[in-house]
Image: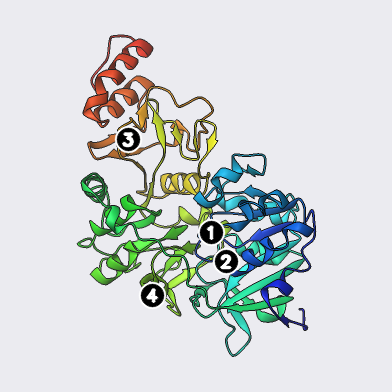
Amino acid sequence: MNTNVNFCTPEEAVKEIKSNDRVFVHGSAATPATLLRALAQRHEELCNVEIVSITTLGPMPLTEAPYNDSFFINSLFVSANVRSAVNSSNGGYVPIFLSEIGILFRRNILPLDVAIVHVSPPDTHGYCSLGVSVDVAKPAIETAKLLIAQVNANMPRSHGDGMVHISQFKYVIESNDPLPEVDYSEKIGSNELQIGQHISELIEDGSTLQMGIGAIPDAVLNALHHHKDLGIHTEMFSNGVMGLMDSGALTNKFKAKHPGKIVTSFAVGNRKLYDRINDNPIISFHEAAYVNDTAVIRRNPKVISINSCLEMDLTGQVCADSIGSYHYSGVGGQMDFMRGAALSEGGKPIMALSATTKKGLPKIVPFLKQGAGVVTTRAHMHYVVTEFGVAYLYGKNLRQRAIALMKISAPEHREELEKAIIERFGSDIHPVS
């Protein structure tokens, strides 16, 4: 362990970062804003500094002029604040399962020179917590040559496997930045409520839930308050979990892995959620390699995996990371949990999506856009849910799948889809049971 921790200014903390270094940046609600601003100010003396991260929240000065020419954004999951950079000559996108990002660091496929993380203040024993983002930060701090920490009293002290002794950091700065907050409750409309109701009817008492972030996951959680003995084992969660906890429906009683506890690798939400997480032994944070391991997921009973996508073709192929060839998000943990749920006894992998975009364009289409990435294959698809109903694709041939998906598409697009089905599969369309 390093016994010479330097408590210093942000400018001093980033002074050892050199040109051509590969730097890991803590993500999600743990994005270290103060240190990123300090690093950006060094742009004139740096070149080709590679920034590796998953989703980051808040401003990203390293992508803004005049700083951006000194930094290359190599994103493992594209977020809004780096999207333009990733789709330019100043960035790139690495398609990879969330469960395998740690392998890139540990096997020196992407060896890290520096890791910049955002942690809670140390306890009386000197241990800081990685707070709301253990996910891929844990393997990053275990492998990087130089560790820099932003210590913040606003960072929740989470339980689980995210403790780091203060002596491991060479440079430590103190900040009082509020954590980035998100709240999708105002975005829950009639479509999301209907999708939530459809999905709630598929979920049995005693199920183990995985859900993402957004209006649809929160709508699903709101529809489950009268269920019994639900559990959570998920790569991440947001504000909707608090209502489920308060309703009494969430007991984690029947989970085989960590019974009685919510298991996650990161969380993003509002300040109320962060306060609920702080020093809460019911919520256990672990790295994504463990949480998203299909062998771990499948041990829980009746795993319900709820994911979403940007586009789906009539055979069930799912594009979730790009719009055509434009990189929009990432692979993340969708496939980890879709497969894990399918292997769970009584599990149900669910793909949930509004039938149309905000502009009224169809999301269920004859063919994916040219250049679109297939994140979840058609062989992995079981349940597809829109506001217009539920399609069960597992065991159905391509023609049957196409008809089932057409029936839950937006009514104004069904004629066009029917024409595409007839053109592709012939006019002898058999009904789907």
Q: Which quadrant is home to the N terminus?
A: bottom right
**Real-space Cα separation, disc 4 to disc 2, in angstroms:** 23 Å
For label 4, the SS is: helix
Q: Name the N-terminal-most of marks 2 and 1.
A: 2
- What residue is disc 3 on? 359
Residue at the spot of label 2: 33
Task: Name the residue type under label 3.
Answer: Lys
Where does the image place residue 287, in percent across and percent down from the top left? 56, 62
In the foreground, 307 or 18: 18
The span from disc 3 to disc 4 (Cα, nearest Å) is 37 Å
Looking at marks 3 and 1 on the same chain, the residue that comes earlier in the sequence is marked by 1
Image disc number at residue 59: 1
Residue type at mark 2 is: Ala
Residue 72 visible? The answer is yes
What residue lies at 25% left-to-right and 31% top-to-bottom? Answer: 410
Residues marked 3 and 2 touching at CB (< 8 Å): no
Q: Which mark is residue 276?
A: 4
Sequence-wise first label, 3 or 2: 2
Q: Quadrant of residue 426?
A: top left
The tally of labels here is: 4
* Residue 274 as seen in the image, left or right of residue 199: right
Residue 205: % across, % down: 26, 58
Q: Secondary structure at mark 2?
A: helix
